[in-house]
Image (spheres, grey):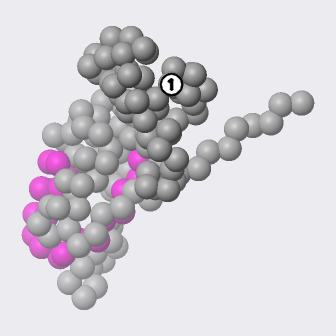
Amino acid sequence: MTTKPKYYIVEASALPEVFLKVAEAKRLLSTGEASTVNEATRMTDISRSAFYKYRDSVLPFQNMMTGRIITFQLLLHDEPGLLSELLHVFAQAKANIITINSIVPTNGTAVVTISAETMDLTVPLEELLAQLQAFPGVVKADVLAG
């Protein structure tokens, strides 16, 4: 009898260093900065056996979310044109908007949820979230579901 795998989202600082190094080695291989596993493991200072042991179990969050529908929750100042400008940020990142829901603004802010398909995303999910958080008029931006 086989058991289904369980997945957890864990802040990187709480992970054992070997997991972070495996993720980095995988990144080096995928970007071509390392052409072999041997080269990638040397660059990250881990053994090849550690790499092979964990390679299928360690996956950065943004890679796991690629090709999925992600729901963002944004708390926005009630400013004319702000939502339109934010949609431009999604468009630049090639996030395909599926739904937009907004509540009536109260106390000068409104909660907006935006669901977007991330199949063609040109930036990592974390970078898109950082762009949204830094955008003028955005009080808070989070990933709700994905």
The vertical placement of 21 against 88, above or below, is: above
Question: At 61% across and 26% down in the image, what residue appears?
Answer: 53
Judge whether residue 79 is colored magenta.
Answer: yes
Foreground pick, 88 / 129: 129
User: Is 54 placed left or right of 20 in the picture?
Assistant: right
Res 109 quadrant in image: bottom left
- Residue 56 visible from this viewpoint: no
The residue wearing badge 1 is 47
Foreground pick, 117 / 33: 33
Exactly how many numbered labels are in the figure? 1
Question: At 12% across and 56% down in the image, what residue appears?
Answer: 85
Q: Residues within 10 Å of mark 1 (few under 14, many from 20)?
A: some
Foreground pick, 105 / 122: 122
Q: Find residue 120 and report its horizontal and vertical position in percent.
A: 30, 30
Amino acid type, residue under disc 1 in the picture: Ser
Q: Find residue 40 and report its horizontal and vertical position in percent.
A: 37, 21
Q: Residue furthest right?
A: 1
The vertical placement of 116 against 79, above or below, is: above
Element assignment for label 1: loop
The vertical placement of 10 against 117, above or below, is: below
Question: At 24% across and 37% down in the image, what residue appears?
Answer: 123
Res 39 quadrant in image: top left
Q: Find residue 125 and report its horizontal and vertical position in percent.
A: 32, 44
- Residue 6 visible from this viewpoint: yes
- Per the rendered image, the range of residues in magenta is 70-89
User: Is 85 placed left or right of 100 in the picture?
Assistant: left
The vertical placement of 88 against 37, above or below, is: below
